[in-house]
Image: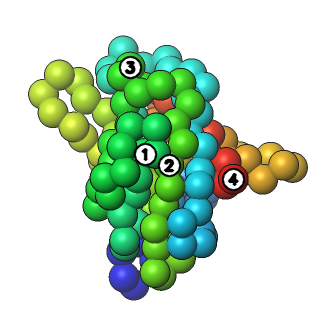
Amino acid sequence: MEIGQKKIFNDAFAEKGLNNVILWDVQNIKDGQLIRVKFISKSSPHRQGLWLITDKGIVIPELSDEIFPSISLWEDTAPKEVICKCYSQDGNLSLYNIWDKGNGTQSQMYTSGMIIDEKDDGILIYNCNDYGFETEFTDLVFSIEKL
């Protein structure tokens, strides 16, 4: 399996009976697809964010026309809503939750992951856990909407 082509589930949570916890999500997009990222809530004492990547890069039109290979959006510094333009040849947008306890960006830990709730209107709500099995998946909650 090639990274960035398919969702990666967290086997540690599967051992606890939760088979829907995702470490790395992959969403299908069109080349030039606009998405809206909206920060909904944060309950962790640690800085929280998300990381996005495509095979051709991402632009945040309201900031510049520069294409970045990947971007990190932090709940405490990004606007509450961010529009991103995603360029992709393979049709994939990869993302996962990130956090910082004060010693640098971390992600993809043994007990980290996201539970995704897809709404009727197609908006995806991501309920994130940075680490630890004792969780309500509320460390960071954000949404992604394809425009």
Q: Secondary structure at mark 3?
A: loop
Determine the image quadrant of residue 37.
top right
Q: CA distance from mark 1 to mark 3?
A: 17 Å
- Relative horizontal placement of residue 71, taking residue 100 as reference (left or right): right
Q: Amino acid at mark 4?
A: Leu
According to the picture, the residue beneath numbered tag 4 turns out to be 147
Whole-number angstrom distance, CA of label 1 to CA of label 4: 14 Å
> Given this view, does label 4 or label 3 mark the residue nearer the observer?
4
Mark 4–mark 3 distance (CA, rounded to whole Å): 24 Å
The residue carrying mark 1 is 60
Spatial separation of the CA atoms under disc 2 and disc 1: 5 Å
N-terminal-most mark, 3 or 2: 3
Earlier residue among tags 1 and 4: 1
From the top left corner, tell me how far across and down residue 133 is, in percent: 44, 36
Give the residue at mark 3: 76
Which comes sooner in the sequence, label 4 or label 3? 3
Give the side of residue 3 with respect to residue 128, left or right: left
Q: Are marks 1 and 4 in contact (CB under 8 Å)?
A: no
Using a 10 Å C-alpha cutoff, classify the residue at mark 4 as few (fewer than 14 neighbours), some (14 to 19) or many (20 or more): few
* Vertical arrangement, residue 30 with respect to residue 134, above or below: below
Which badge, 4 or 2, is on the more N-terminal residue? 2
Could you tell me if the residues under marks 2 and 1 are in contact, i.e. CB atoms within 8 Å? Answer: yes
Q: CA distance from mark 4 to mark 2?
A: 10 Å
**Circles 1, 3 touching at the beta carbon (< 8 Å):** no
**Residue named by callout 2:** 84
